[in-house]
Image (cartoon, helix red, strand yellow):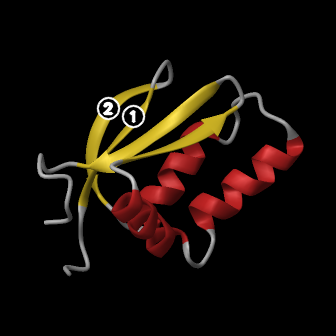
């Protein structure tokens, strides 16, 4: 398995879909994009940890191995993350 994987990040109503290489920095940028959106305090803390915690990249890889699209609720919106290549598997 390669250390770098291209993913599509879609935050409907906030940002158009983009393709990035999955990294801690990319996940932190997702958090920077959504951290100020309206959400409960508990959801804010859970998402911050989910996207910026020490195991964030590993957890996203694990979740995408189990399901082709990772959906993270953000208040009344959601973040969708999926592999960028059409086979649904890491490159």
Crowding at dot 1, Cα within 10 Å, few <14 / some 14-19 / many 20+, comes out as: some
Residue 5 in picture, x, y percent from top left: 24, 65
Residue occupying the point 49% across, 18% down = 13
Disc 2 target residue: 17
Image quadrant occupied by the C terminus: bottom left
**Residue located farthest toward the front when viewing the structure as drawn:** 66
Task: Work out whether 34 lies above or below 14.
Answer: below
Residue occupying the point 69% across, 30% down = 37
Disc 1 to disc 2, C-alpha distance: 4 Å
Residue 48 in picture, x, y percent from top left: 69, 56
Q: Helix, strand or loop at disc 1?
A: strand
Report the side of 69 relative to 53 (left or right).
left
Are the residues flagged by discs 1 and 2 in contact, CB closer than 8 Å?
A: yes
Query: Residue 10: which disc?
Result: 1
Query: Residue 43: which disc?
Result: none
The quadrant holding residue 19 is top left
Task: Work out whether 69 lies above or below 21.
Answer: above
Q: Closer to the camera, 54 or 70? A: 70
Image quadrant occupied by the N terminus: bottom left
């Amino acid at each position: 398995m390669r250390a770098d994987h291209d993913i599509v990040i879609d935050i409907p109503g906030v940002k158009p879909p983009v393709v990035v290489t999955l990294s801690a920095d990319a996940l932190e940028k997702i958090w920077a994009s959504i951290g100020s959106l309206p959400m409960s305090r508990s959801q804010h803390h859970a998402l911050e940890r989910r996207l910026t915690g020490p195991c964030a990249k590993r957890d996203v890889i694990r979740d995408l191995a189990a399901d082709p699209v990772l959906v993270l609720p953000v208040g009344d919106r959601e973040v969708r993350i999926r592999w960028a290549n059409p086979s649904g598997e890491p490159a």
